Image (spheres, rainbow, N blue to C red):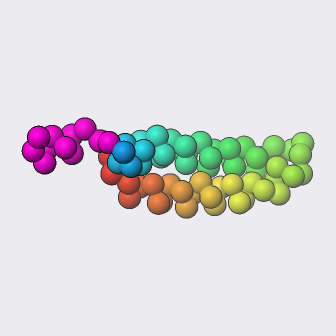
Amino acid sequence: MNRADADATPRGWKRFFRRGPWENAATVLIAAGVVMLMQPYFMVLYTFSFAVILTGTVGFVVVSHFPE
């Protein structure tokens, strides 16, 4: 097996740290934070909304450096 074949089939940590699923998770986290920010019923959700948005944004920036 040559180097090109080894890169074509991700194994181990490369398979776990693929960009696509992690970007989707970070995007969902950002969207959940925005929903938490706009809902009028639960103060605790509003209180933690900024932290959730910030976590999702930092996660997205980190994940954007993962291999495809």
**Residue 61 placed where, x, y %?**
47, 60
Check the picture and name the quadrant holding the N terminus: top left
Asked if residue 54 is among those painted magenta in the image, a careful observer would answer no
Evaluate whether residue 1 shows in this view: yes
Left or right: 5, with 47 as reference point: left
Q: Residue at x 13, y 48 (%)?
A: 3
Left-right relation of 14 to 35: left
Residue at 38 percent across and 49 percent down: it is 13
Residue 9 lies in quadrant: top left
Q: Nearer the viewer, residue 37 or 17?
A: 17
Magenta stretch encompasses residue 10:
yes
Q: Nearer the viewer, residue 21 or 14?
A: 14
Which residue is found at the position 90% from the left and 42% from the top? 41
37 up-or-down from 1: above or below = below
Give the image location of residue 35, x and y in percent: 72, 43
Residue range corresponding to the magenta coloring: 1-11
Residue 19 visible in the picture: no
> Residue 21 appears at what percent x and percent y?
46, 40
Task: Judge whether 2 appears above or below 63 on screen.
Answer: above
> In which quadrant of the rendered view does residue 58 lie?
bottom right
Q: Residue at x 21, y 40 (%)?
A: 8
